[in-house]
Amino acid sequence: MTDKLRNPIYSIVGPTASGKTEIGVELALRLGNAEIINCDSVQIYKEIQIATAKPGEEEKRGVAHHLIDYVSPEINYTAAAWAADASVKIGEIEARGNIPILVGGTGFYLRTLRQPLFESPKTDQDLREKLAALKDEKGAEHLHKILRRIDPVSAGKLYPRDYVRSMRALEVYFQTGKRFSELQPNREKPPEFAERIRIFALNPPRDALYEKINARAALHFERGLVEEVKLLREKGVKDDTNALGAHGYRRVCEYLRGERDLESAVEQTKQDVRNYAKRQMSWFRREAGVVWLEGFGNDPKTREKLFEVAGFERL
């Protein structure tokens, strides 16, 4: 058996603002021959900067990072596309004799990498625009209500406000006449490396996490989040894209459309991100084989626990 097949692939997950970047870089430095692959659905986008927590060169500390800043914000990039790109990067990194580390909190991306999706129809832009208009008129929960009538199994796996996935399930149904839940079993086989992915999840104290989330959201607005969104919209990026539907950006768009005042946009963003952190924790608790690390990623005790349970003496 080759070294490549013996080596684990590490994945650092957890809620937003928990310190995944810091501990991921520390892990890479401890390994000495590791490279990081971004697993965050917002950090992939170019020109989306302020509210993304993309690591700067100083934070990277010389560790190679991949799949950051490489997708136009006008593209509604999918989990399947990320999984395909991540698979290529994993192959390239291991071909160099290095170890991949997946870092990010987008659980659906990681699950799609480990359990590939079925081949779905290409996006029908007219249908998507109609569904988006319905969402804008009646709310995200309305799309979920429609999906619940058509495909209760798929709806039961989604949060009512997860309009992106509700919309995609509806698109599949209206384009194929088949329920998303019926098509899902027709998946491709998992890649060879799927069984080698070892997942470590950060679990910081909730009160401290929420305090950090609130402070960070306020700082994003102070650093020019509104101006960033204005520039993106002037360049033609639509409000209903995945990029501007991200936390913070969505509420700024509402503010710029006159649907809420700035103070409300800031406070709602804080609430949105806190709710998102809850959903992330719930998601990773449902994943198999996750090793939980108590504390933030910048806590030396959390890092040492990771190094201990990762079993570096065997590397």
Image: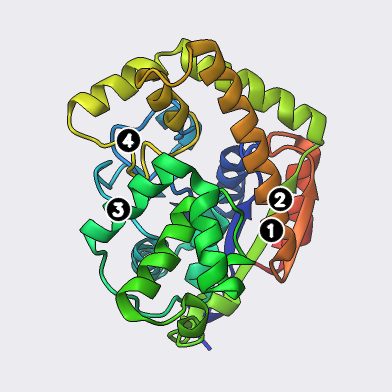
Q: Distance between the residues labelled 3 and 1?
A: 33 Å
* Secondary structure category for the residue under label 4: loop
Q: Which amino acid does label 1 sit on?
A: Phe
Which label's residue is closer to the chain start, 2 or 4? 4
Whole-percent x, y for residue 10 in the image: 59, 61
Q: What element carries label 1?
A: helix
In the picture of the structure, the residue carrying the numbered disc 3 is: 130
Residue marked by disc 1: 284
Find the distance from the CA under tag 2 to the CA under tag 1: 5 Å
Going from N to C along the chain, the mark reached first, 4 or 3, is 3
Mark 1 crowd level (few <14, some 14–19, many ≥20, 10 Å Cα): many
Tell me the residue that label 4 is attached to. Answer: 239
Whether residues under marks 3 and 2 lie with C-beta atoms below 8 angstroms apart, the answer is no
- Residue 146, compared with residue 12, is above or below; it is below
Label 3 element class: helix
Q: Where is residue 262 in the image (x, y as percent from the top left)?
A: 48, 12
Contact between marks 2 and 1 (CB within 8 A): the answer is yes
What's the distance in space between the residues labelled 4 and 3, CA to CA? 15 Å
| Residue 263 placement, left or right of 298 | left
Give the labeled residue for mark 2.
Answer: 281
